[in-house]
Image (spheres, rainbow, N blue to C red):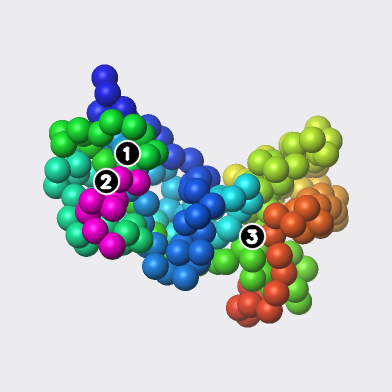
């Protein structure tokens, strides 16, 4: 089976080349086109490019079509000026592509720029689950086993209270969950993976 006929699954993390980061953050690139059928499991994804997380996006639409059916509109959504320019980028990424190969067009909108976070918010405006996902992806070498258990549970609950009860057995121990989150967040900032600047209004913490 060729690459263009395979089915893959996309989790919470969407990887792009560093050269596309600015176009995503500016809104010029509003889609990514991947060879083969990609099943997108979640409505919100964290986009990574240039070795760091760059944005949180909301998936607006997922379309499957054959290479021969790609249009100028598809190319423009992906940040290219023509179908031929898009096809050249696909060949550069995947090698040979055929007219009958399937592609997946994942359309999205940026809901959070991870280089412009909120310094006045204790968690920089990030959801607990997003901090946990980033920490587990980038900080594995510095996390203890209990910290990993807490962070993994937060990716499911997105709730400090719920994780305190589920993992530590008591709501009174939510301070431990907060401590793990703050340590992870501080390390992500220290490594330059995310940055705090004035951004949107604070969100209510769970």
The magenta span reads 81-89
Compared to 152, does 30 lie above or below? below
Query: Mark 1 packing: few (<14 Cα in 10 Å), some, or many (20+)?
Result: some
Compared to 108, does 165 lie above or below? above
Name the spot of residue 158 as percent of width and height, x first: 63, 53
* Total labels drawn: 3
Q: Front-most of 5 and 50?
A: 50
Query: Mark 3 packing: few (<14 Cα in 10 Å), some, or many (20+)?
Result: some
Q: Quadrant of the C terminus?
A: bottom right
Name the spot of residue 66 as percent of width and height, x first: 18, 40
Residue underneath mark 3: 127
**Residue contact at pointers 2 and 1, CB within 8 angstroms:** yes
Which of the marked residues, 2 or 3, is nearer the chain's N terminus?
2
Q: Secondary structure at mark 3?
A: loop
Q: Front-most of 141 and 85?
A: 85
What label does residue 91 carry, if any?
A: 1
Residue underneath mark 2: 87
Residue 88, magenta (yes or no): yes
The residue drawn where x is 30% and y is 35% is 36
Label 3, label 1: how many angstroms apart (C-alpha)? 37 Å
Label 2, label 3: how many angstroms apart (C-alpha)? 37 Å
Which of the marked residues, 3 or 1, is nearer the chain's N terminus?
1
In this picture, residue 79 sits left or right of residue 98: right
Label 2, label 1: how many angstroms apart (C-alpha)? 6 Å
Name the spot of residue 69 as percent of width and height, x first: 14, 47
Q: Secondary structure at mark 2?
A: helix
Q: Secondary structure at mark 1?
A: helix
Q: Is residue 110 visible?
A: no
Residue 15, magenta (yes or no): no
């Amino acid at each position: 089976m060729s690459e263009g006929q395979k089915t893959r699954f996309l989790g919470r993390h969407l990887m792009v080349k560093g050269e596309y980061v600015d176009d995503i953050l500016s809104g010029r690139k509003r889609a990514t086109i991947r060879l083969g059928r990609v099943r997108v499991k979640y409505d919100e994804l964290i986009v990574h490019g240039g070795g760091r997380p760059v944005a949180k996006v909301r998936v607006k639409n997922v379309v499957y079509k054959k290479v021969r059916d790609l249009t100028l509109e598809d190319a423009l959504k992906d940040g290219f000026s023509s179908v031929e320019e898009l096809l050249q980028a696909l060949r550069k990424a995947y090698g040979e592509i055929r007219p009958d190969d399937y592609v997946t067009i994942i359309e999205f909108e940026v809901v959070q720029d991870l280089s412009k976070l909120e310094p006045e918010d204790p968690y920089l405006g990030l959801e607990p689950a997003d901090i946990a996902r980033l920490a587990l992806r980038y900080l594995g070498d510095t996390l203890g086993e209990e910290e990993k258990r807490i962070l993994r549970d937060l990716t499911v609950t997105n709730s400090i209270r719920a994780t305190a009860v589920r993992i530590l057995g008591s709501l009174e121990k939510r301070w431990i969950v907060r401590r793990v989150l703050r340590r992870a967040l501080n390390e992500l900032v220290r490594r330059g993976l995310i940055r705090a600047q004035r951004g949107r209004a604070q969100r209510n913490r769970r």
